[in-house]
Amino acid sequence: MYRSHVLVCGGTGCTSSGSEKIIAALESEIQKNGLVEEVKVIRTGCFGLCALGPIMIVYPEGCFYSMVQPEDIPEIVSEHLLKGRIVKRLLYSETVIEDSDAVKSLDETDFYKKQLRVALRNCGVINPENIDEYIAYDGYQALGKCLTEYTPEQVIDIIKQSGLRGRGGGGFPTGVKWSLARANDADQKYVCCNADEGDPGAFMDRSVLEGDPHVVLEAMAIAGYAIGATQGYIYVRAEYPIAVKRLQIAIDQAREYGLLGKNIFGTDFCFDIDLRLGAGAFVCGEETALMTSIEGHRGEPRPRPPFPAQKGLFGKPTILNNVETYANIPQIILKGSDWFSGMGTEKSKGTKVFALGGKIKHTGLVEIPMGTTLREVIEEIGGGIPNGKKFKAAQTGGPSGGCIPASLIDTPMDYDNLIAIGSMMGSGGLIVMDEDTCMVDIAKFFLEFTVDESCGKCTPCRVGTKRLLELLNKITSGNGELADLDKMEELCYYIKANSLCGLGQTAPNPVLSTLRYFRDEYVAHVVDKKCPAGVCKDLLSYSIDADKCKGCTLCARNCPVGAIEGKVKELHTIDTTKCIKCGVCMEKCKFGAVVKK
Amino acid sequence: MKSLEELKALRDQMKNKVGVREDDSNNTRVVVGMATCGIAAGARPVLAAFTNEIEKRNISNVTIAQTGCIGICQFEPVVEVYAPDGTKTTYVKMDAEKAVKVVCDHLVNGKVVTEYTIGANV
């Protein structure tokens, strides 16, 4: 038995901030101190507080060490693991109790207090590469219960009654989807998992796959039992190497235990899962394109109907659910539909995972009950906006979603409320913007993304988004006219109405929602030829305030294009014809004499 | 794995191995003095003996922790056992054999090993 477990985050966030080095240092120090048989080091999935990585939790005390560096490890091992003295200076500041050797539990910190972890329940708790740990936390019990106690119809009824809706963005009721696929007779049916998470700023699905891969396998097997399928495919992008590796390990272990394969739990039910790696095209997150890609063709969507439940993968009835949707299912089976429908709002049950990013203190992964307000997420869980800036807007749903302005910060977030205010739940990316963000520029950013990612099959999307981007470029370069705004709006509605798949149908949302809530900013770009946030370069000019300039020459020496002239102790000037608006002079000036307008 | 029973058996077995990560507020806590004085007096083998014996007997609901010097260095290795209700028993001048006996008598059968306590050794 190990008296102490050291959990180190091995998610992508902490891995890139160096958690592998931490693990190596820990193992060698533990060896050096002769603690190999007493202390166990476990690599887990994401804890959520990515901003403070690399993260490490030491049990039984439950000490949460943040921003740990390899140099800190000898101290942690000799002080904490050997002598039992907590290294206070490395504790996450919120867990420190003044004048006490005890630590505050993580659940009491602002970041975790309001969270409710269902889909993420094992993330940061178990070793994702060890099936035994998943089993220790009731893993595969739900599958066993389904196979031995419920008929497929009963399983579908439980999912229906729970009110679970697709977490990939659309919000289609999962139970209904399953019953449609069950109703279709076929010699072969398929269960697919959409792990092709591609929105900029979204990493919920990746974290589930990295932290708890077995939950997806178990849920897919349950889905297979419910609809009568024997084969599952997980479509995961190749850019998620850690997730791919852990999924493959999980599949191998599940097969070895007989939890995948033939006659599972001694019943007639057979089910196996294979991985399919995507090359990272955003359109492959669309269900028909995804299936086309699994079949080995170029990932392009096709018209619906027929819906996948009738004719999906290889022309057979297929269900496709998102990673997070699957992550909820075993818990629903074990705890019952009433438990699940007891969380959330009237039409949106359960919880939702959000990837919190942008101008926010606690960048990371949060799971909250549906109906939590944006204010709670940003101000309480997220810790507010850094550097004392003001909150301007939040973007949900990535390139398919829209902006929520500061005036709507008290909106409870669920599927229907977000649609009503012109955004959407999306898969759960939540990008926070402060007063320094230009909304026209944001719309342009997302549109550049969709223009890049449009597959080109249908004209409204291929040409429409391109024209829309051109109009945005015209505006941000100072050549816009007021009529362009109306033209853009018209084009947006045209693209939405005529595109073949979800990518095109939602691509104009960032433009529409910024036009709706920040029209004054567009007008400022067009009429005054100014960018109020000071972002759009073509509308800016730098100058030097004669009263503040001391003639220190620092700006002139740092200007990469030699656009600043002036002698020592004399006023400097910027030659605007040479200036490339890089902002270095402003950064370097110690007297605040450089002005951006 | 051929049946749900088998899975449940494996779960219960694994549960103990990850128990250290669970909420331990209802656990009996065995706290071993691991300051320099404790280690010098031989606290390491005592700690190891507790861990091994608890594993051998498959005892759950016990947390093993270390602590610093409590100021009675002449009695080291010192081990304190806190029951969930907060009552404390202090064992002194411990060694690995005594640790095994404490696990057996105190932790399993609930009988304090009076002869090892501080009261019997002052």
Image (spheres, coloured by chain):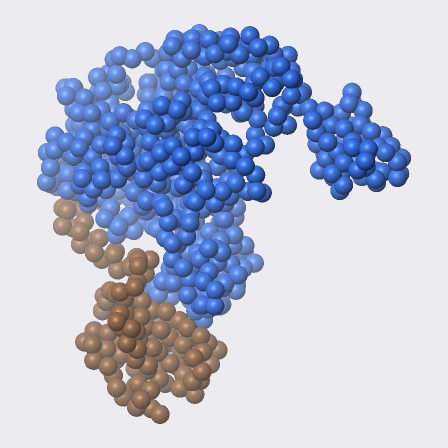
Chain colours: A blue, B brown
Q: How many labels does the image show?
A: 0
Seen in the image, is A362 located left or right of residue A119?
right
The answer to whether A376 appears left or right of A214 in the picture is right
Answer with left or right where residue B49 lies relative to residue A391. left
Is A81 above or below relative to A492?
A: below
x 52%, y 48%: residue: A18
Q: Which of the two residues, A551 or A154, is positioned nearer the viewer here?
A: A551
Position of residue A489 relative to residue B64, above or below, is above
Taking the spot 38% from the left edge, 57% from the top edge, the residue there is A105
Rendered view: A56 above or below A303? below
Farthest residue, direction bottom: B122
The quadrant in which the C terminus of chain A is found is top right
Q: Position of residue A89 (x, y in %)?
A: 53, 61
In percent of width and height, residue A183 lies at: 14, 21
Report whether residue A238 is seen.
no
- Rendered location of residue A506, percent (x, y): 41, 18
Residue drawn at (25%, 13%), measured in percent from left and top?
A306
In the rendered view of the protein, which quadrant contains the N terminus of chain A?
A: bottom left
- Residue A156 visible here: yes
Q: Residue at x 33, y 31 (%)?
A: A414
Q: Position of residue B61 (x, y in %)?
A: 25, 65
The answer to whether A80 is drawn above or below residue A264 in the figure is below
Q: Looking at this view, is A437 or A143 the one in front?
A: A437
Q: In which quarter of the image is residue A549?
A: top right
Q: Quadrant of residue B60?
A: bottom left
